[in-house]
Image: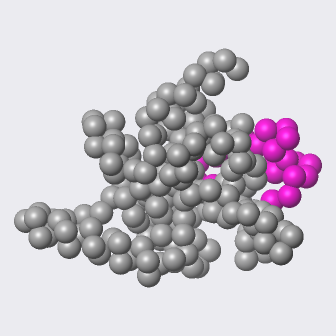
Amino acid sequence: MFFKAPSCDGALNLEGRVHMEQGQFYFLLDDYFTTYDKEHKLMRNKEMIDGKEHGRPCFYAFADRKNHLILWCVPISSQIDKYIHIYNHKITRQRDKGVRAPRCNTIRFGEVMGSKKAFLIQNMFPIIKKYISDIYINQLTQEAVRIPGNVERDIISHADEVLRLVRSGNVNLVFSDIIKTYNDLNGELEQL
């Protein structure tokens, strides 16, 4: 069971600016999407459902290698069949082009609290803590949701490879202009 952490006293109080940590899952403020996703290419916060705020999607976060104040967010999805189909299609296309060892860096799979999830590296983007609203909390343990070390290593290594490729000009591997957003966030940090 998961729930969105309420704004309350302690480490989860984002009014007091939560400490961002690699390996946790976060929910984002709408301000981030208003500021950095004017073309609506990212997975946005869900609307109100039955009068209740629905905090999905949540984003797995890992630290930027150059600037520790920036985290990279990777959305997760429970639509496994959909993303397995897309993953397999990408592998088949590579095989059809003669690639001997086809691979897909943009969609990875792993368990989150015992359930298989798709990690959508193709939808990743950078963030700073000012745009985080809440941490994803396990309702049973009251602790931040984390993933196993092997899944974390897989996600980060493939995301790093995608970032390297995007920085070298393969911008179509991701949906939004993550390099511009990264530079703009660095500009915001310089003004603080």
Looking at the rendered image, the quarter that the C terminus falls into is top right
Looking at the rendered image, the quarter that the N terminus falls into is bottom right
Question: Which residue occupies 51% across, 77% down?
Answer: 79
User: Is residue 71 something one can see in this rendering?
Assistant: no
Q: Report the magenta stretch's main SS.
A: loop
Residue 62 to residue 102: above or below: above
Q: Give left or right: position of 168 versus 191.
A: left
Residue 62 point in image, percent of width and height? 53, 48
Question: Which residue occupies 37% across, 43% down?
Answer: 163
Query: Which of the 4 image quadrants contains residue 71?
Result: top right
- The one nearer the camera, 61 or 33, is 33
Query: Which of the 4 image quadrants contains residue 187?
Result: top right
Residue 63 point in image, percent of width and height? 53, 42
Residue 83 to residue 73: above or below: below
Q: Is residue 4 magenta?
A: no
Looking at the image, the residue that sits furthest to the front is 39
**Magenta-drawn segment:** 5-25
